[in-house]
Image (cartoon, helix red, strand yellow):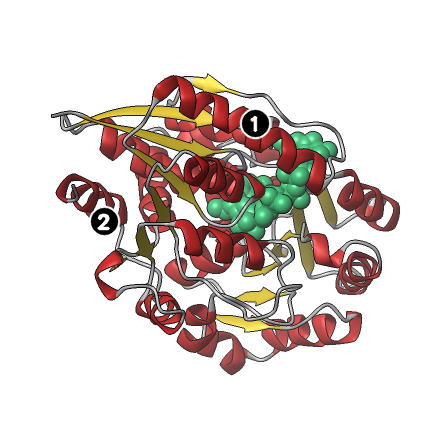
Amino acid sequence: MTQTILVVFGTRPEAIKMFPVVHALAADPRFRVVTCVSAQHRGMLDQVLAIAGIVPDHDLDLMKPDQTLDGLTAALLTGLGGVMDAEKPDWVVVQGDTATAMAGALAAYYRKIPVAHVEAGLRSHNIYHPWPEEVNRKIIGTIAALHFAPTETSAAALRAENVASDAIHVTGNTVIDALQWVSDRIVAEPSLASGLAELEARFAGKRIIGVTSHRRENFGGGLEAIAEAIRQIAAREDVALIFPVHPNPNVRRVMENALGNLPNVALIEPLDYPHFARLLGLAEIMLTDSGGVQEEAPALGKPVLVMRETTERPEGVEAGTAKLVGTETARIVSEIFTLLDDKAAYSAMARAHNPFGDGRAARRIVELLGNVR
Ligand code: UD1
Ligand code: UDP
């Protein structure tokens, strides 16, 4: 009998990590896949839908400028609940730790629909770092019937919370599937990632540092300290920083005020996934507070300095490709300068590892969904 699988997502990183699952489900006749986007993100979500070729069956179009967590969560619960009532799925699949994923799991639970959680078991053990994601994923972990843990570390975290072992499956992280898929697309069609040519020419001969930053817990002082670090790094003539700025007004305001007029800092619009993959290739170092970039950089052997105090992704740090540098200006600047000036320190980090998966996570997830009753 065909199973109806409702796949729910709403932000850029969820879309990137969920499209391999949607593709794999759609190719398998055992399933009827129904996609529902909350559009908690709009433009950044649409960039991923376009490259992945996904036209959602339901689009709640919920994003509001500078949305609050409670307003967003309330709208998500009723919106996603309505779609579940209409579609009556056998399973709801959510990914990660966003408001959309948490509300999707909760709305399914209210209807006693089983939930499968992609990227389960990530834990920082600090409910304010990252905020509100740590609690979102714990809520989902309490509800889910199937937990697709990306690594053995995340599986162990779930077992430590008394999740039944037979409900936990180590699949790898679907971000590696996504990165491999987009890299293959770029090889076949280089124009998909050729839009940085002008910047590449402008910064020819400079050492490129790629930057992203958007964490809610850093709003205010944290972001200002990060901006000041970038300003000090940019005082060096041998570097150029390419920074696709998250459209959240709390991020944009700070970065545009502090960095808007520096000759070797390019504040640009969010890049679509092929162009971001290109930036990952161009950069000598990534400087980020992003979750997904912490997973992609190790796969490419790209040193990544993580502007956070803790991480729920210790595998990159253990592999040596990622380093936690916090959000204080002086520390960020000195860690970047060490990587720029100390060849041994750089090569110690610049080794490709795949602690997060082998590119076959989505296939495993779909097999597991097919095997449960
Ligand atoms: C959300 C997730 C976070 C994830 C991040 C990835 C929650 C609570 N937070 O944070 O876990 O790491 O996405 O980027 O679920 N905006 C736009 N266009 C867009 C997207 C956002 O203009 O395409 C602006 C809007 O003003 C919006 C604001 O950014 O209100 C914040 O978006 P929101 O999804 O609430 O939070 P993020 O900080 O993006
Ligand atoms: N990314 C992108 N364009 C950008 C910046 C990031 O496509 O301009 C991708 C990146 O490759 C990663 C994901 O977006 O896969 C990370 O999203 P984000 O940092 O917004 O969220 P997080 O991973 O921290 O939840």
Q: Disc 2 marks which residue?
A: 360
Ligand 1 has an atom within 8 Å of the beta carbon of the residue at disc 1: no
Along the line of sight, the residue nearer the viewer: 325 or 335: 325
Q: Please say whether residue 63 is visible from this viewpoint.
A: yes
Residue type at mark 2 is Arg
Above or below, comparing residue 355 to residue 102 in the picture: below
Quadrant location, ligand no. 1: top right
* 145 left or right, relative to 238: left
Residue drawn at the location 39% of the way across and 53% of the way down: 119
Q: How many marks do you count on the picture?
A: 2
* 222 left or right, relative to 129: right
Disc marking residue 19:
none
Residue drawn at the location 62% of the way across and 58% of the way down: 289
Residue drawn at the location 57% of the way across and 36% of the way down: 271
Q: Disc 1 marks which residue?
A: 78
Residue 14 image position (x, y, % from top left): 47, 41
Q: Please say whether residue 244 is visible from this viewpoint.
A: no
Residue 129 image position (x, y, % from top left): 64, 64
* 124 left or right, relative to 259: left
The first of marks 2 and 1 along the sequence is 1
Give the image quarter of residue 68.
top right
User: How many residues crowd around disc 2 within 10 Å: few (fewer than 14), some, or many (20 or more)?
Assistant: some
Ligand 2 has an atom within 8 Å of the beta carbon of the residue at disc 2: no
Residue drawn at the location 43% of the way across and 33% of the way down: 8
Along the line of sight, the residue nearer the viewer: 134 or 221: 134
Residue 335 image position (x, y, % from top left): 66, 75
Give the image quarter of residue 29.
top left
Residue furthest right as drawn: 257
Tag nearer the camera, 2 or 1: 1
Residue 220 image position (x, y, % from top left): 83, 55
Along the line of sight, the residue nearer the viewer: 225 or 135: 135
